[in-house]
Amino acid sequence: MSVRLLIAALFISTIFPKIMFAQTWAGNDFVPSAHCVPRPYDPKLDNYKFWMNQHRSRKLKGGFEDHHTIDLVLTVIDGDDLQSNDPFASFCGMITTLSVSDAGTVSMQRVTPMAVQGGGPGMLPDVDWKRMRGLITVLRKHLPEDHSRLPPPGRRAILQVRRGKRVIARVYDRADLPESIAEIFGLTGATHGPMAMDFVPAATATQGQVSESDIPPDAIGIRRPHPRDPATNGIRPDSVILAISPDHSLTVTRYLFLDDRTVVSHGKSSVVVFEKPNGLSGRRFIYVSRASFSPDGRYLLLQSNLPAVYVYETKNWGLANTEAKVPPDRVAYYPANDWKHGVEVKQTGSVVLWDAISARKMTTLDVDGELQSVSFSPDGSLVATTSVRQNPDQSSTFHLRLWDAKTGHFVRELRSLYYFEHDVIGDPMWWGDGKYLLAETKEGQFGPYVIAVWNAESGKLRGGFSGCGFADDRFDVALSGDRLFKWCRSDKLLTWNIPEAIKQVSTFEAFRESARAHVSGRRPNEAAFNSPSN
């Protein structure tokens, strides 16, 4: 599990005044010794030109036994904001170096106050080496700009690239890495370096402490525990709300375990108006996995794991696939919020963008594997898909991708903190106006599971809602109003305050943009960082 490092004071060079943040960062396994204390500000140590000259003058070397010509070196520096108060231990930090040679080998070296450690050299897999060679070629011509300013101490990563006999270098903020630099961390198999904000729960309750009223009635997609029947003391099954009609008159509820069925009931009276029983197909249990109402409430779409799609007319509960313009040869269908288009899975397994107005296929989406889930942004401009591909070595590769919902053009991939693809990615959930996207993922190769939050516009992973591992429960996470809920394997229910977390993310992003604006000659907006909460 990663260690959280609380950075309470943030110095951003003499151009800006000192700005105070209260942020907890994940993705860092550096633990300072007891004799380490914060070092006072030293203009020389925080001068960009002085600090970078030492990295531009060094010859690139590989770790330990790698004697190949080194093309690229990534160095992560921890503890440069500390100093020792022990006369016998002058070094407080940790320096981790990843080296890539022209032969495709990777080696690692780590220097701590206690020892020098290392590993490698090991060969990159062919597909990764091909990608790495391409990145090095591009970086030799143009390194992402660092704007000639140092990131805060404790968050610095130096990239050095060999260009002929010269070494070119840049320093980047580990909490705001350019995409190409983050990809290099991933290709080298780094388990230390990139950072993101960590958001701890605002409340924790065990299942025995959770009542029906603790989960809001409009929370869709999360398991609701029910106490025993007050009259008979009989066990009542857990349930999950799959959908609520636009006018809130109808609710689709799936009951779990002892009474597994799906019913549609009146929102106020709870009178059941339609029921779809679940059952067995051979040895396979068949159930309704997803539901959605059309914007006018006229149609209800139910998705079964058979797989099958059923569309019902809500006035008489007759089938209405043709009238609703649902694709004819689909095995799964995910309509957009306005039902004017959607994502269809064909019987062949291909995934296409469907135009419901003209009832025609628009384009095929390259999801790279089997489609898992789909979510359209609130304004309908983007669609997020998750997919899984089974690899020859029996591992699985997961993707979270964004597409233009009107054209089907690929927009970007949203990756985990360390580009670790061989693990789970949960159903995507949009927040607010669609600027941010949330989904369960793993914090790192050896880190815990979190509900990550990405900036959908930049593709940057900005933080994670932490507190428990992956629950192996399809109905374990939900957004409702300002709160995020998650069930843990230990049957604890965690709750986070979303606006509070997003405020930290947006403040950090605005400050980074203002810093860049100052370098480019535009006046930075400092007012956003001088509020009492910062």
Image (cartoon, grey):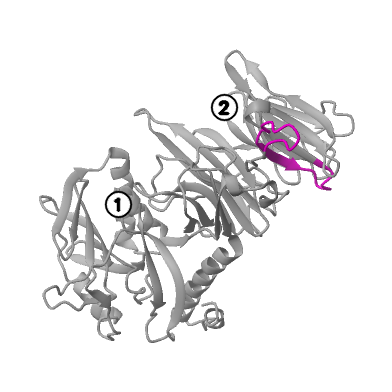
Q: Earlier in the sequence, mark 1 or mark 2?
A: 1
The residue shown at (51%, 60%) is 458
Of 67 and 336, nearer the camera is 336
Q: Compared with residue 191, is residue 425 higher up or lower down, i.e. above or below?
A: above
**Residue 233's disc number:** none
Q: Compared with residue 424, is residue 530 higher up or lower down, i.e. above or below?
A: below
The residue shown at (70%, 54%) is 379
Figure quadrant of residue 31 = bottom left
Q: Amino acid at mark 2?
A: Gly
- Numbered disc in front, either 1 or 2: 1
- Other residues around mark 2 within 10 Å, as few (<14) / some (14–19) / many (≥20): some
Residue 381 visible here: no
Pinpoint residue 350: horizontal percent, then vertical percent. Answer: 57, 30
Distance from disc 1 to disc 2, alpha carbons, whole Å, reads 34 Å
Kindly identify which residue carries mark 2: 349
Pinpoint residue 115: horizontal percent, then vertical percent. Answer: 13, 60
Q: Residue furthest right?
A: 315
Of 485 and 146, nearer the camera is 485
Mark 2 element type? loop
The residue shown at (51%, 45%) is 488
**Highlighted range, magenta:** 228-250
Mark 1 element type? loop
Residue 182 visible here: yes
Pinpoint residue 326: horizontal percent, then vertical percent. Answer: 75, 32
Pinpoint residue 20: horizontal percent, then vertical percent. Answer: 45, 79
Q: Compared with residue 292, is residue 163 higher up or lower down, i.e. above or below?
A: below
Kindly identify which residue carries mark 1: 190
> CB of mark 1 within 8 Å of CB of mark 2?
no
Q: Amino acid at mark 1?
A: Ala
Q: How many marks?
A: 2
Q: What secondary structure characterizes most of the magenta part?
A: loop
